[in-house]
Image (cartoon, rainbow, N blue to C red):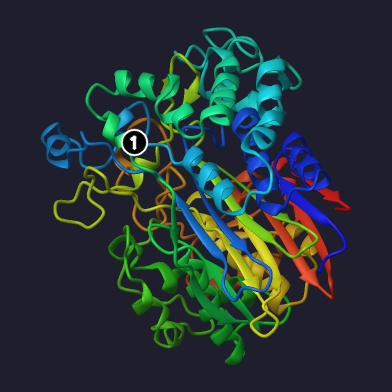
């Protein structure tokens, strides 16, 4: 279908690895695995072997994409009652291994390779292994993140020693070289032994030892990657696809479905610079997600939400802030997009949850552990209560759109951004599918987001606010919308007139590192987010 293949990631080394795989005869899934593995080496503030992943794979000629949920489960030692007895009211955010489910990333690579791979896993992981063993130059974003978070952290010496002193005094410097020998050993072991090289190898043994009963060998034996039925919704002339719960992807579909209804009522202007556009889109996101805390848990049936879009859209009025019966509180993820010339397309997200996850590292390998367990609740009896073998609610939103008649890919849009991910996807998809903007125009345009609370995970009620306030963090919950600096002046005016409290936030990565591939007229346009500083699109003629 397309004249070329394309890989868009947050880092040029990762994009180049994906392109090289395409040029050596691999397909889009092969390229995504290779790029994801490099990101696990060079972007540990965003993702890693200790995190999770989701993927949507459009298969040429197939009606619906394959959907992979490679997210980990709580260990056998998970005990919400014990945590309540210890005085916890919410899950720990940092510095506690109980915020770490079993990592799903490596199982995700294995599952993708077994089903769709055309090249051996060794070939796909070797670029990342070489970079980890031989070293790479730290990006400015990584250097700043290490200096601000990890100086002196046990197990993370390969990250902070090249950049900062133990007390954090010396400046982090762009371009300092670092190597990650422990990660290189794991990648070599996985290439040779499959998942056993990770879960039964050096990392797995170390995780069990340091967890002190939280995880068992049986927990690590359980395969963490499942092929699941994707969710779909027709809107703006395309069929939209995402992952089902425990992903919050349904919010992107619901928000776009509501936005289409607003367009039909004349409430969504044709010009996204019009202040009424920001109001309508933000309201669509609010009424789509107000009941997220009750609705989102593993295996939740969110069909009732998708079937209620007419009703939810009817709550929205021009010039008014909708009153909804929920509470909106007034990271560390990276995404990539890949496509090959045969029409296979991949929306892929790999994540630690917050930056550097728990800030806990397996000491032998230097692998950081995700803090995705913060998505659990400690509310007794809730379907997302912290419990053995259970997956937490997840912010990750893989997304793609297809032409319902031709079954060809129309759009891949994916991003990091914590609770804001559905809102960023909504804006990108609406701009491309409804307003006809190019991938680059949509990517460079300013963004809004629902205020995400203190941690980036508190949009729908931030129970952790008191703890972060005590640590000096801002807890201004009168604000319900953030506008990126440089947003059209009319956005703020209309939001204020409609009863919203908003604040201008500096342009940057807090509004996502997105990637877009737009398929139109038999060709492909791709764009990487300038907010990531190093986002790169690599193209291949194969």
Q: Tell me if residue 388 comes above or below residue 485 in the rendering.
A: above
Q: Which residue does the image show at 40% across and 87% down from the upper left?
A: 311
- Can residue 530 be seen here? The reply is yes
- Which quadrant of the figure has residue 275? bottom right
Seen from the viewer's position, the closer of residues 285 and 118 is 118
Residue 177 in the image, given as x and y percentages of width and height: 72, 16
- Which quadrant of the figure has residue 182? top right
Quarter of the figure that contains the N terminus: bottom right
Residue 139 in the image, given as x and y percentages of width and height: 71, 28
Left or right? Give the position of 129 relative to 206: right
Q: Tell me if residue 510 comes above or below residue 433 in the rendering.
A: above
- Which quadrant of the figure has residue 281? bottom right
Q: Which residue does the image show at 65% across and 61% down from the upper left?
A: 413
**SS for dot 1:** helix
- Can residue 424 be seen here? The reply is no
Q: How many marks?
A: 1
Residue 364 in the image, given as x and y percentages of width and height: 46, 14
Seen from the viewer's position, the closer of residues 452 and 92 is 92
């Amino acid at each position: 279908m397309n004249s070329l293949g394309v890989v868009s990631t947050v880092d040029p080394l990762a994009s180049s690895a994906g392109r090289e795989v395409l040029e050596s005869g691999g397909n889009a899934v092969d390229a995504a695995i290779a790029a994801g593995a490099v990101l696990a080496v060079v972007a540990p503030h965003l993702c890693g072997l200790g995190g999770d992943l989701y993927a949507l794979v459009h298969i040429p000629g197939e009606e619906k994409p394959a959907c992979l949920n490679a997210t980990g489960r709580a260990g056998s030692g998970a005990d919400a009652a014990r945590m309540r007895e210890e005085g916890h009211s919410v899950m720990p955010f940092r510095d506690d291994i109980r915020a770490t489910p079993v990592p799903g990333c490596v199982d995700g690579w294995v599952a993708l390779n077994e089903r769709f791979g055309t090249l051996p896993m060794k070939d796909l992981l070797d670029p990342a292994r070489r970079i980890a063993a031989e070293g790479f130059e730290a990006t400015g974003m990584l250097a700043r993140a290490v200096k601000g978070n990890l100086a002196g952290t046990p197990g993370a010496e390969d990250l902070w020693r090249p950049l900062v002193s133990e007390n954090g005094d010396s400046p982090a410097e762009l371009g300092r070289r670092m190597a990650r020998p422990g990660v290189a050993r794991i990648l070599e072991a996985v290439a040779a032994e499959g998942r056993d090289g990770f879960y039964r190898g050096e990392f797995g043994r170390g995780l069990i030892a340091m967890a002190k009963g939280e995880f068992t060998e049986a927990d690590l034996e359980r395969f963490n990657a499942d092929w699941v039925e994707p969710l779909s919704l027709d809107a703006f002339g395309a069929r939209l696809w995402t992952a089902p719960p425990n992903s919050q992807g349904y919010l992107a579909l619901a928000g776009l479905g509501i936005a289409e209804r607003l367009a039909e009522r004349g409430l969504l202007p044709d010009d996204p610079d019009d202040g009424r556009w920001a109001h309508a889109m933000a309201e669509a996101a609010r009424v789509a997600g107000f009941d997220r805390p009750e609705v989102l848990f593993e295996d939740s049936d969110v069909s009732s939400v998708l079937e209620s879009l007419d009703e939810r859209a009817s709550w929205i009025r021009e010039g008014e802030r909708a009153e909804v019966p929920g509470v909106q509180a007034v990271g560390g993820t990276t995404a990539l997009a890949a496509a090959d010339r045969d029409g296979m397309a991949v929306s892929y997200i790999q994540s630690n949850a917050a930056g550097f996850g728990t800030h806990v590292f397996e000491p032998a390998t230097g692998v950081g552990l995700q803090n995705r367990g913060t998505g659990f609740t400690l509310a007794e009896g809730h379907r997302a209560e912290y419990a053995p073998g259970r997956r937490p609610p997840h912010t990750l939103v893989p997304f793609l759109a297809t032409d319902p008649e031709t079954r060809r890919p129309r759009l891949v849009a994916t991003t990091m951004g914590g609770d804001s991910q559905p809102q960023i996807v909504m804006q990108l998809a609406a701009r491309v599918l409804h307003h006809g903007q190019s991938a680059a125009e949509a990517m460079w345009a300013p963004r809004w987001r629902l205020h995400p609370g203190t941690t980036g995970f508190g949009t729908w009620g931030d129970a952790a606010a008191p703890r972060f306030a005590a640590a000096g963090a801002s807890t201004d919950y009168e604000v319900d919308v953030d506008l990126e600096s440089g947003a059209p002046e009319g956005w703020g005016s209309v939001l204020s007139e409609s009863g919203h409290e908003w604040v201008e936030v500096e342009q940057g990565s807090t509004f996502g590192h997105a990637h877009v591939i737009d398929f139109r007229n038999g060709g492909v346009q791709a764009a990487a987010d300038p907010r990531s500083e190093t986002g790169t699109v690599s193209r291949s003629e194969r």
